[in-house]
Amino acid sequence: MNGKITFVGAGPGAVDLITLRGAAALDEAELVVYAGSLVNEKLLERAAKAELVNSAKLSLPEVIEIMAAACRAGKRVVRLHTGDPAIYGAVSEQFRELDRLGIPYEVVPGVSSAFAAAAELKVELTMPELSQSVILTRMAGRTPVPEKEALERLAEHGATLCIYLSAGDLDGLVEKLASAGLPPETPAAVVYRASWPNQKIVRGTLNDIAGRVREAGIKRQAMIVVGRVLGRDGALSKLYDESFSTGFRAARKSDGFRGRTAIFALTAAAAHKAAEIAAGLDEAMVILPEKHAGAVHAARLVTYPEGDFAGALGRAWNEYDGLVMVMAAGIVVRHIGTLCRSKSSDPAVVVCDEAGNYAVSLLSGHLGGANRLAADVARITGGRPVVTTATDVQGVMAFDELAARRGYRIVTPGTLKRAASALLDGVPLELEMPGALYEEFYAGNPRFHLAADTPDITVKLPGGGVFRMVRRRYALGVGCRRNVPAERIEAAVSALLARYGIDWEQLVSIGTAELKREEAGLLAFAAEHGRELRFFGADELNAVEVPNPSRMAEEHVGIRSVSEAAALLAAGPGAVLVAEKAAAECVTAAIAEVKADE
Ligand code: SAH
């Protein structure tokens, strides 16, 4: 016997609301036994080579008999149910019989009509402060309902109700809900044949829904949804509350890890965890041995041949800002020893166990951002970040962490260690820094004294010498099509700055091409921010080496690159491009860091 039986949820009706797996089972099927009128017969067109049997008029033993015989004859059988088979699908008695006969089967879920109805109503069934539970139920009919699940008792919870199989007696239903204490103004909706071409939606309250449904002539094949979530005045979901943070939305963007991340995994389980982590980070690639390639979306995947882990790690070391290693810490420690160079250039390294329970910040905790990357990873996997840097353990903001988070550059790396000790050693410290930063991070500790409110940061070290950091400064290069409004430019630049964690005040200059001298939107944008707009001629721009020259622009206006070249020119000698060209809606922008004068 090589046949098999697959129970498939057909979904609510629309032919494209079946799952891919369910559709594939139909494509392959040699016998399809389907459940009467609620299954869309158009779906059966897929089962081109199958014998079709409508089960509506068959008894349970007959259905089992037909399926068992086909299966014994080596055929692939699909038992097609509406919606999801697990909800009022009468599948349990079929499972029981097949178990008894020793015939194997599998189940493919489907979109239940409650969810199809919610989609058509465009409603979230679970809304904070209104209801956090959904009750899928039916009224007692020919099939009795256990006493404790009587509608009048379930309704007492005030939870959202999705009621199946009950459109025939809406008056009785409303009466039961009222007797449970639901107010007459409770919103209710009835969706007839959700997702079918002849779908009908009736909205109302418990007060009037029965009459409206009667008028619409609906008696069956309808989903009844009752609950306050149907009102449009519900409390906004906390998900959209700025201060509420989920795995995918960090509470404060600038305090998360910023940069490109490579995620390594060696086993199949770890590869799946890596895919989960990658999906929650901004710019992440997953680097896997070829045999696990299937675990990850191709667009995020880099593979290496079996046995070349060390080689792949070595390449990633130089290419990425952060590495997340989903494997034992020992493997990582043994491999990165020879790769480590310096605090200022090594990537952040975070080790995560394959269950995602712990995210250990292993290397470059502050400047490299590993502590923040560990926090991000733990938020995504629901695990705990493990951080061992002393300042964090003592709850003091380390200077190199402050530099990484707020855009400072350390100009005296030689005294960083002494500055860090001074923070931890319990001695009084004189700080020169912006007052607001002092208030945010150091004012709470009486050892730290604000000696002067300055834009840059200087720490007088006990025993002589200073530690100094300066705010990084940047120049923006912009290009745009003719007549692009200032708001468009504003939006594109804001997005780019946010992506690189740069404040407007760090932008000291803006550059563009000479031929944009009369471009009103661009002029207004620069004026709005009080920045001088600097214009560079084609020859000047073309003399600058850029990573992303555009052949189109060269053909049209004789300039190979506006944004990248103008950013570099505006930033002056020694400038470094930090944000390569980003293009959005007829605007291109790039950012270069100013390196002169230091
Ligand atoms: N297993 C199915 C339910 C079968 S019971 C599912 O998961 O959806 C049949 C009941 O489901 C109907 O009485 C009706 O209440 C509901 N139903 C099924 N398809 C529907 C549709 N397209 N629109 C509205 N209700 C539907």
Image (cartoon, grey):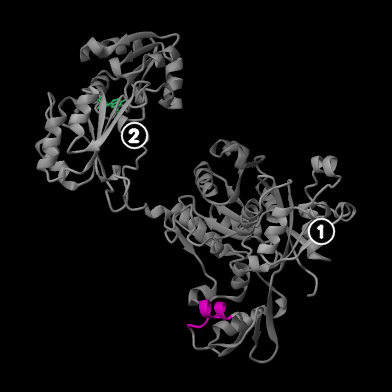
Residue 331 painted magenta: no
Residue 305, compared with residue 213, is above or below; it is below
Q: Is residue 59 left or right of residue 543?
A: left
Quadrant in the picture for residue 366: bottom right
Nearest to the observer: residue 198 or residue 118: 198
Q: Quadrant of ligand 1?
A: top left
Q: Where in the figure is residue 160, as x and y percent of width and height?
A: 25, 42
Which residue type carries mark 1? Phe
Residue 477, compared with residue 58, is above or below; it is below
Q: Where in the figure is residue 346, as x and y percent of width and height?
A: 68, 62
Q: Give the numbered dot on residue 493.
A: none
Instruction: Measure how far apart labels 1 and 2 are at the Cα level.
Output: 57 Å
Q: Mark 1 or mark 2: name the one nearer the start of the chain.
A: 2
Look at 60% across and 37% down and name the residue there: 298
Question: Which quarter of the rendering shows the C terminus?
Answer: bottom right
Look at 62% across and 68% down and name the residue there: 404
Residues at discs 1 and 2 in contact (Cβ within 8 Å): no
Which residue type carries mark 2? Phe
Nearest to the observer: residue 463 or residue 126: 126
Bounds of the magenta segment: 435-444
Q: Which residue is mark 2?
A: 115
Crowd class of label 2 (few under 14; some 14 to 19; many from 20; radius 10 Å): some
Specify whether residue 220 is in view: yes
Q: Which residue is mark 1?
A: 535
